[in-house]
C-alpha cells in the first residue's frame, strides 16, 4: 500500500465524482443510508448501552456506503440490487475487524465526551449521548459552550483517524489499530484536498438547504391546514437525509485517490 499526495483542487473533484456515483442509483443509495440509520436508531434504544452500540455501528455504515460507491463508480452502471449487495457483502466479509474498529471508535468518542465534561459537569455529554433536554439557558451558558468547543476540537483528530480506517481494513486488510494511524497520516498529508472537499460540501448543503426552505415555505403558504406545515417539515428532514447519503457516497473517492496497492 502506498500513499498518494493529491493537490488541493482534488477535493472539489471528489465532490463531483461522488454526486455522479450517487446519481447512478439514487434510490439505492438513499435506501441503503436509511437502512443503516434505522439500524443505528434501533440499537440506540437498548437500555443503558444503546448509545455505545450505536456509536460502534458508525464505521460499519461508512464501509457499507463506501463499498456501494465503489460498485457505482465502475465502468458499467450497476443495478440497484448490485449496489445494495456490494455494501452488505463488504460488511459481512469484515465483521470481526469492524467490531474492533467500532469498539475503538466508541471508546475514543466517550473519552472525548469525558474530557468535555470537565468544563460543564457533563451537561453537553448528556444532551448529545442521552438525548437530554436542551434549554436556551443551558445552550447559552459559558460552561456548555466551552464543553462544546472542547468536544469539537478533540473530535477533529478522531474523525481524521477514522476517515479512511474502515476502507483500509476492507480493501488493504490493515489491522484496525494500524488503520487509524495510516488514516490520520493520509488525511494530514492531504489536508488541503480534504479542506476543499469539506468547504465545497458546506456550500452544497447551504444551497440545498436554501432551496428546500423555499419549497417548504411555499408548501406552507399554499396549504391552509396544519398538514401543509408538517409536509414542509418532512421535506426539510428528508432533504437533509438525502444530502447526508450523498456526502457518505463521496467519501469513497477520498480513499480511492489517497491510497494505491503496491
Image (cartoon, rainbow, N blue to C red):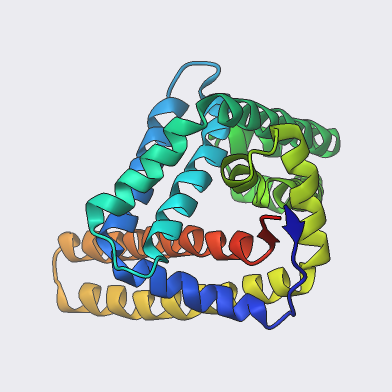
Residue 200's x, y, as percent? Answer: 59, 78
The one nearer the camera, 85 or 180, is: 85
Please state if 74 lies on the left or on the right of 204 as rendered: left
Q: Is residue 257 above or below residue 186?
A: below
Quadrant in which residue 231 is drawn: bottom left
Can residue 31 be seen here? no
Residue 146's x, y, as percent? Answer: 82, 49
Please give the name of the residue rendered at 37% of the width and 39% of the height, measured from the top-left corner.
Answer: 88
Please give the name of the residue rendered at 16% of the width and 60% of the height, measured from the top-left corner.
Answer: 227
Residue 245's x, y, as percent? Answer: 42, 58
Work out which quarter of the rendered image holds the C terminus and state it. Answer: bottom right
Residue 242's x, y, as percent? Answer: 37, 62
Please state if 214 lies on the left or on the right of 99 as rendered: left
The one nearer the camera, 179 or 236, is: 179
Q: Is residue 211 above or below residue 117?
A: below
Please give the name of the residue rendered at 49% of the width and 78% of the height, measured from the top-left corner.
Answer: 16
Q: Is residue 92 above or below residue 124?
A: above
The one nearer the camera, 229 or 247, is: 247
Please state if 27 lies on the left or on the right of 223 as rendered: right
Q: Is residue 248 above or below residue 207?
A: above
Q: How many marks?
A: 0
Can residue 138 be seen here? yes
Amino acid at each position: 500500500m502506498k500513499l498518494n499526495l493529491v493537490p488541493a483542487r482534488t477535493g472539489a473533484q471528489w465532490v463531483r465524482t461522488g454526486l455522479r456515483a450517487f446519481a447512478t442509483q439514487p434510490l439505492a443509495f438513499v435506501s441503503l443510508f436509511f437502512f443503516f440509520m434505522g439500524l443505528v436508531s434501533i440499537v440506540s434504544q437498548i437500555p443503558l448501552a444503546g448509545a455505545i452500540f450505536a456509536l460502534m455501528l458508525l464505521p460499519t455504515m461508512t464501509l457499507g456506503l463506501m463499498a456501494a460507491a465503489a460498485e457505482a463508480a465502475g465502468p458499467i452502471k450497476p443495478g440497484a440490487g448490485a449496489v445494495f449487495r456490494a455494501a452488505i457483502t463488504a460488511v459481512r466479509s469484515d465483521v470481526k475487524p469492524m467490531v474492533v474498529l467500532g469498539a475503538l471508535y466508541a471508546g475514543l468518542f466517550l473519552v472525548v465526551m469525558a474530557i468535555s465534561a470537565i468544563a460543564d459537569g457533563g451537561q453537553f455529554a448528556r444532551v448529545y449521548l442521552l438525548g437530554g433536554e436542551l434549554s436556551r439557558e443551558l445552550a447559552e451558558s459559558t460552561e456548555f459552550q466551552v464543553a462544546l468547543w472542547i468536544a469539537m476540537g478533540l473530535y477533529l483528530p478522531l474523525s481524521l483517524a477514522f476517515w479512511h480506517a474502515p476502507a483500509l481494513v476492507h480493501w488493504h486488510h490493515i489491522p484496525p489499530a494500524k488503520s487509524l494511524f495510516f488514516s490520520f497520516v493520509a488525511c494530514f498529508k492531504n489536508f488541503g484536498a480534504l479542506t476543499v472537499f469539506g468547504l465545497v460540501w458546506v456550500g452544497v448543503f447551504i444551497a440545498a438547504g436554501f432551496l428546500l426552505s423555499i419549497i417548504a415555505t411555499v408548501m406552507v403558504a399554499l396549504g391552509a391546514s396544519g398538514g401543509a406545515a408538517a409536509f414542509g417539515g418532512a421535506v426539510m428532514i428528508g432533504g437533509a437525509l438525502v444530502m447526508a447519503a450523498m456526502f457518505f457516497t463521496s467519501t469513497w473517492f477520498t480513499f480511492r485517490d489517497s491510497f494505491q496497492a503496491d
